[in-house]
């Protein structure tokens, strides 16, 4: 067992932002369960975001996340989404560029022991420096995942 696995198993909240393999698809032991990182992305910063699990704590605590939280995003929605995920992962959001297939790997979450593992391809690295309020609200919710009882 790695130190990272022990951290999550013991109650830690591990947040991993987008990753990219050097040779296309990357299968990795980045999370506690099987997860492949794809080259999938949504480049339209105005693409509709669908809430697949609207009651999930990441969309409700401490901030209620709504469509308004995705207003004002710059350049794109996300890159290098999770693909071919183990069923233990919860796919929270979906989105797509116009005329493209819906992508569900922008925010995936899994419980592991007492902890939580989060993989996100959402482009927080663009939105946070740009001061996009919804990006800050969603990131706060991701960080707070283990603070909500019953999750």
Image: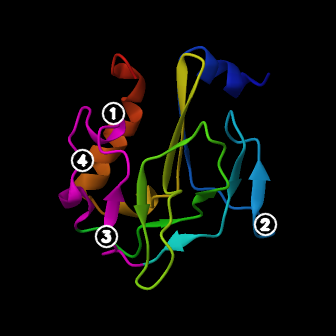
The residue shown at (49%, 57%) is 106
On screen, residue 53 above or below 79: above
Distance from Cα at disc 2 to Cα at disc 1 = 34 Å
Relative horizontal placement of residue 28, taking residue 128 as reference (left or right): right
Element assignment for label 4: loop
Q: Name the residue under label 1.
A: 57
Distance from Cα at disc 3 to Cα at disc 4 = 14 Å
Q: Give neighbour class at mark 1: few <14, some 14-19, many 20+ (Cα, 10 Å).
A: many
The residue shown at (34%, 60%) is 50
The residue shown at (22%, 66%) is 71
Front one among 25 and 130: 25
Magenta stretch: dominant SS? loop
Residue 116 forms part of the magenta stretch: no
- Residue furthest toward the bottom? 99
Q: Mark 3 points at which residue?
A: 48
On screen, residue 51 above or below 96: above
Residue 96 spot, x, y in % from top left: 44, 73
Distance from Cα at disc 3 to Cα at disc 2 = 30 Å
**Magenta segment boundaries in residue numbering:** 44-71
Q: Name the residue under label 4.
A: 65
Relative horizontal placement of residue 35, taking residue 112 as reference (left or right): right
Distance from Cα at disc 4 to Cα at disc 2 = 34 Å
Displayed quadrant of residue 134: bottom left
On screen, residue 11 above or below 63: above
Q: Name the residue under label 2.
A: 22
């Amino acid at each position: 067992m790695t130190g990272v696995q022990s951290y999550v198993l013991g109650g830690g909240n591990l947040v991993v932002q987008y990753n990219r393999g050097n040779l296309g698809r990357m299968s990795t032991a980045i999370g506690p369960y099987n997860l492949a990182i794809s080259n999938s992305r949504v480049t339209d910063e105005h693409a509709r975001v669908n809430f697949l699990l609207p009651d999930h704590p990441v969309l409700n605590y401490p901030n209620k996340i709504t469509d308004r939280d995705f207003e004002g995003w710059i350049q794109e929605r996300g890159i290098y989404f999770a693909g071919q995920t183990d069923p233990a992962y919860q796919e929270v959001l979906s989105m797509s560029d116009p005329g493209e297939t819906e992508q569900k790997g922008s925010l995936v979450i899994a419980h592991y022991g007492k902890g939580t593992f989060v993989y996100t391809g959402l482009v927080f690295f663009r939105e946070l420096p740009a001061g996009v309020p919804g990006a800050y609200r969603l990131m706060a919710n991701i960080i707070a995942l283990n603070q909500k009882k019953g999750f």
